[in-house]
Amino acid sequence: MSTQAVDAPMVEMRGVHKWYGDAHVLRGVDLVVPPGSVTVVLGPSGSGKSTALRCVNQLEEIGAGSIHVEGELMGYREDSSGRLHRLHPKKIADQRTRIGMVFQRFNLFPHMTALGNVMEAPRQVLGVSKAEARERAAQVLTRVGLADRLEHYPSQLSGGQQQRVAIARALAMNPDLMLFDEPTSALDPELVGEVLGVMRELAASGMTMIVVTHEIGFAREVADQVVFMADGVVVEHGPVSQVIDAPREPRTQDFLAHVL
């Protein structure tokens, strides 16, 4: 757990820009995520939602601006003159250990059981013993409803079960923050509910979460704030009652008219 001031935002993005060559994907994104809150990010494809999430986790290097997690500048150090210097990859990897991320695709090791997949990062990254890693993995797999699937391989699991293993894998690192990048978009409709159920339980437990999704019902139920992005900018943000139920911006209104 971080030793940063308890009143610091969990995530603070200020003026974040990102380019891929000539493509200006993020255009000055500002976002503040309080500890223990759930932020749902909505928007059309290509709006920059997933890129913003990957920048928080330092899977993408930003072009301008800053990102702090629990008060710590991510990816850079600032010298006495205010200049920023990119951190060594090992230091960036250390920062990333506090952040769990769940992707659209499950990316499980096919040759490992559910238990093995979840044990791997605590053993390799945190250096915990095999016995402790096994106990931790069994606990988080039980938490996501897979106590009876510990020794099953990915090929023996449904898509929803595989995604729950992926969530358990992230939780096994005891993260302070969980990022979800459209975690149900690769699932058959009948399997979406079981994954959202796990995410609801995490939200109820007080886990700080940023969720990129098109699941409006989920957003209504658990979001403390909703962010609508389009063309690399935050068009609108606020509580569900504003952004989803009474959006002010035409782009938000148009998007919701198509997805609701």
Image (cartoon, rainbow, N blue to C red):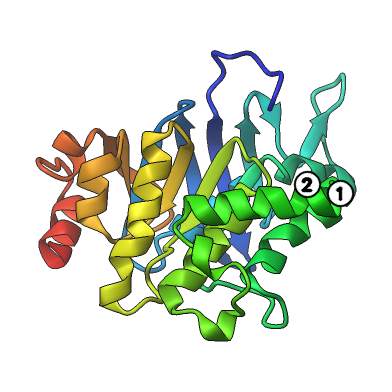
Give the secondary structure at mark 2.
Answer: helix
Residue at the spot 36% in from the left edge and 35% down from the top edge: 204
**254 over 73 or under it: above or below:** below
Q: Position of residue 209 (x, y in %)?
A: 46, 41
Q: Which residue is mark 2?
A: 132
Give the secondary structure at mark 1.
Answer: loop
Q: Which residue is mark 1?
A: 129
Question: In the displayed image of the protein, which residue is found farthest to the front?
Answer: 148
Q: How many marks?
A: 2
Q: Position of residue 248 (x, y in %)?
A: 14, 40
The local crowd at label 2, few if under 14, some if 14 to 19, many if 20 or more residues have their Cα within 10 Å, is few
Residue at the spot 19% in from the left edge and 60% down from the top edge: 255
**14 over 253 or under it: above or below:** above
State the separation of the CA atoms marked 1 and 2: 5 Å
* Residue 52 visible (yes or no): no
Residue at the spot 87% in from the left edge and 25% down from the top edge: 79
Residue at the spot 39% in from the left edge and 39% down from the top edge: 203
The local crowd at label 1, few if under 14, some if 14 to 19, many if 20 or more residues have their Cα within 10 Å, is few
Residue 43: give its label. Answer: none
**217 over 113 or under it: above or below:** above
For the residues labelled 1 and 2, say whether their Cβ atoms are less than 8 Å apart: yes
Quadrant in the picture for the N terminus: top right
> The residue under label 2 is which amino acid type?
Glu
Task: Work out whether residue 84 or residue 152 is closer to the camera in this orientation and state it.
Answer: 152
